[in-house]
Image (spheres, rainbow, N blue to C red):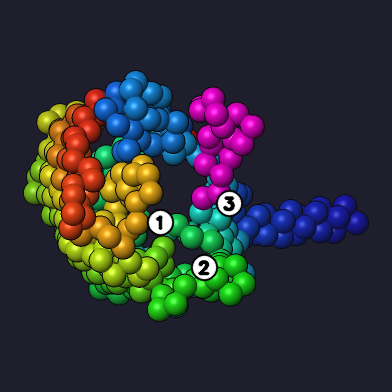
Amino acid sequence: MMNKFALSTLAVALSATSLMAQAEAPQFYGALRASVTHADTGFASNPGGGEGTQLENDFSMIGVRGSHAVSDTLNVVYQAEVQVNGMDQDNGKDPFSSRNTYLGLDSSQLGRLIFGRHDQAFMLAEGKVDQFNLTNTDMNRLLAGNNRHGDQVMYFSPNMAGFQFIGSYLLEDDYYASGKAPEGVDPYSVTVSYGDKMMKKQPFFFAVAYNGGIGGDEAVRATGQYKLGDFKIGAVYQNTQDKEFDNLDGNGFIVDLAYGLTEKLSLKARYGQDDSGNGGYIGKVMGSLDGLDKTTVDSTKVTNYAVGADYALSKQTKLFAHYSVFDAEVKTAAATLYDDTDNLFTVGMHYKF
């Protein structure tokens, strides 16, 4: 009798262990990121920043993610992530905002299908080219399309000999208010990439992407990055057309360099420009011009150059500093409405857990 009881207990324990192995424990993760910046205009600032000397929140966040095996080749995958805004005095009563949050299925043979909020496919074409990512000199200051959206269906293909396809589609009837979907906008974007954006399995990454209208822009993007020893060079080219204002269209690019001086210290530099009138920086400039009728804008241009350094205190913690300049102008056929330079001096710390 005792042996039967012991065997039964062991069987139950092994069964429970097997179930626990199938349903992996959720992973709690996050990042706290802050910087102090002195800016002439504040048009490039991250949340909490502005003109003068400001404390910026470089998109601190917390989240939970995980997977649950439902067969040998299929997993349920999930993620719930929010931005933490409490560093800013003005957001004390509204300390959280939404980030990537989704539910889906992942197959080792067929790929991943998710539903919810996520960085759109077009954005993912950037890989790791942006050496000033998440700071006030993020590439989205120049180039449109780096957005995340809810009410979205996304598909990630398996890696096939180094190639991967990613597609995003917005459920228009849900994303837009009833009857408010803009005309002529195709709510999808796609990316095809080749190589390894982390530069571990391959020393290169290339991607091409198309956005049919998510976020209000139609755009084509080409990206490339190559690593040679401790040196990385990356570039992004983009053509952007505003779907509401036909006169706001043009081309933009960035070229980013990074060099690992020591195991802990790396240097970086950027040169880029855009004349489409659709990037984040020029959008804020035009938003500051009282009574501006965008249909009258004849030309815009933003040029950005920056130099900086990152110092790794540990795998989870880095200190950084950079100097960045934005030259911007907005013209109509009759006059120059804006022509000014923004100098940014930034020091900060990013910590991941």
Q: Badges 2 and 1: C-beta atoms under 8 Å apart?
A: no
Please give the name of the residue rendered at 34% of the width and 21% of the height, measured from the top-left corner. 53
Q: Which image quadrant is residue 276 in? A: bottom left
Residue that extends furthest to the top in the rendered view of this protein: 53
Mark closer to the observer (3, 1): 1
Residue type, mark 3 in image? Ala
Please give the name of the residue rendered at 37% of the width and 68% of the height, measured from the top-left corner. 244
Q: Tag 2's secondary structure?
A: strand
Q: Give the x, y percent position of residue 353.
A: 47, 35
Which of the marked residues, 2 or 3, is nearer the chain's N terminus?
A: 3
Mark carried by residue 147: 1
Which of the marked residues, 2 or 1, is nearer the chain's N terminus?
A: 1
Label 1 Cα crowd, 10 Å radius (few <14 / some 14-19 / many 20+):
some
Please give the name of the residue rendered at 38% of the width and 23% of the height, measured from the top-left corner. 54
Q: CA distance from mark 2 to mark 1?
A: 12 Å
Q: Give the x, y percent position of residue 221.
A: 23, 65
Task: Report the side of 262 relative to 156 (left or right).
Answer: left
Q: Is residue 86 magenta?
A: yes
For residue 156, say whether it is visible. Answer: no
Which of the marked residues, 3 or 1, is nearer the chain's N terminus?
A: 3
Mark carried by residue 152: 2
Label 3 Cα crowd, 10 Å radius (few <14 / some 14-19 / many 20+):
some
Q: Tag 1's secondary structure?
A: loop
Q: Residue 32 or 276: which is nearer the viewer?
A: 276
Q: CA distance from mark 3 to mark 1?
A: 17 Å
* Quadrant position of the N terminus in the picture: bottom right
Residue type, mark 2 in image? Gln
Q: Is residue 172 above or below residue 307?
A: below
Q: Which residue is mark 3?
A: 80
